[in-house]
Image (cartoon, helix red, strand yellow):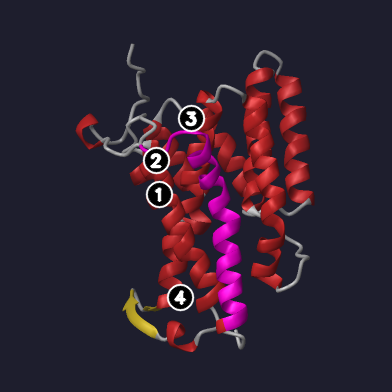
Amino acid sequence: MEKKLPASVFPEKLQILSGSALKMIAMITMLIDHTACILLQSYAPANQTLFYLNGKGYTLYRVCRDIGRVAFPIFCFLLIEGFLHTRNRFKYARNLLLFALISEIPWNYMHTNTWRAEKQNVFFTLFLGYLAIWALEYFWENQQKQFLCVLALLLISIKFNADYGWRGFIFIILLYLLRMDKPAQAIVGSCWLYYEWKACFAFISINMYNGKRGFIQGKWTKYLFYAFYPVHITVLVLIRRYFFPVL
């Protein structure tokens, strides 16, 4: 039996994006964002005004960073899809934590050019959010345990200063709770992201999701998707170090 998709903002004929397509959109926009963050931030030509919009000047650097805002909501949506459909939730959580640890040194060098940084990479945010929605489901009939688990994980997120902060952690929970109502998910999620309003455009592609896995299948391609995060950061940091030493 074909699974029934949640209500969407768009009609069925426009729901043309598979999970694999969403992953590609998220990875490409993240790559654009991190290229700007690592290479363009201190590169003078990239910080020259290209055009004005509502009296505000936009540079190549700013445009790339704004494009990159859509990546995080898509990754959060894919996290929830993975949670709902994985055959082994423990292994899924293990992979998130493993790549959080692997990504930490490249992430630190990205921001400080040293092996230490005050902020933790986004895999930690996704890992803690994953544990939170798992706790919500596991203790569905015990609201007190739900609250205590989510609160504990939230405090851990704040303590370790995970990427996107407490707002990112709560955002994952909101997407999970509204998973069966895409219009409400888009409205509430967009309101929650008011401080990064460009991220709201992610809900266009999310509402074009057709519920199919797509072309990224199999064990090794799945791990390549995970590995893209630390690998592309490492490559960009090395480019900055050896080709743009003044940055």
Q: Given this view, does label 4 or label 1 mark the residue nearer the observer?
A: 1
Predominant secondary structure in magenta?
helix
Q: Which residue is mark 1?
A: 24
Q: Given this view, does label 3 or label 1 mark the residue nearer the observer?
A: 1
Give how far across and how far down residue 156 sits, in percent.
78, 44
| Residue at image coords 56%, 46% | 226
| Residue at image coords 60%, 81% | 242
| Residue at image coords 66%, 62% | 107
Kind of residue at badge 2: Ser
Q: Which residue is mark 2?
A: 20
Kind of residue at badge 3: Leu
Q: Which residues are magenta?
A: 215-242
Kind of residue at badge 1: Met
N-terminal label among 4 and 2: 2
- Which image quadrant: the N terminus? top left
Q: Which residue is mark 3?
A: 178
C-alpha distance separating marks 4 and 1: 22 Å
Label 1: element kind = helix
Residue 120 visible to the viewer: no
Q: Given this view, does label 3 or label 4 mark the residue nearer the observer?
A: 4
The dot on residue 61 is 4
C-alpha distance separating marks 1 and 2: 6 Å
Residue 184, placed above or below residue 54: above
The dot on residue 181 is none
C-alpha distance separating marks 3 and 1: 24 Å
Label 3: element kind = loop
Residue 148, placed above or below residue 122: above
Magenta-drawn stretch contains 231: yes
| Label 3 close to label 1 by CB (< 8 Å) | no
Q: Residues within 10 Å of mark 3 (few under 14, many from 20)?
A: some
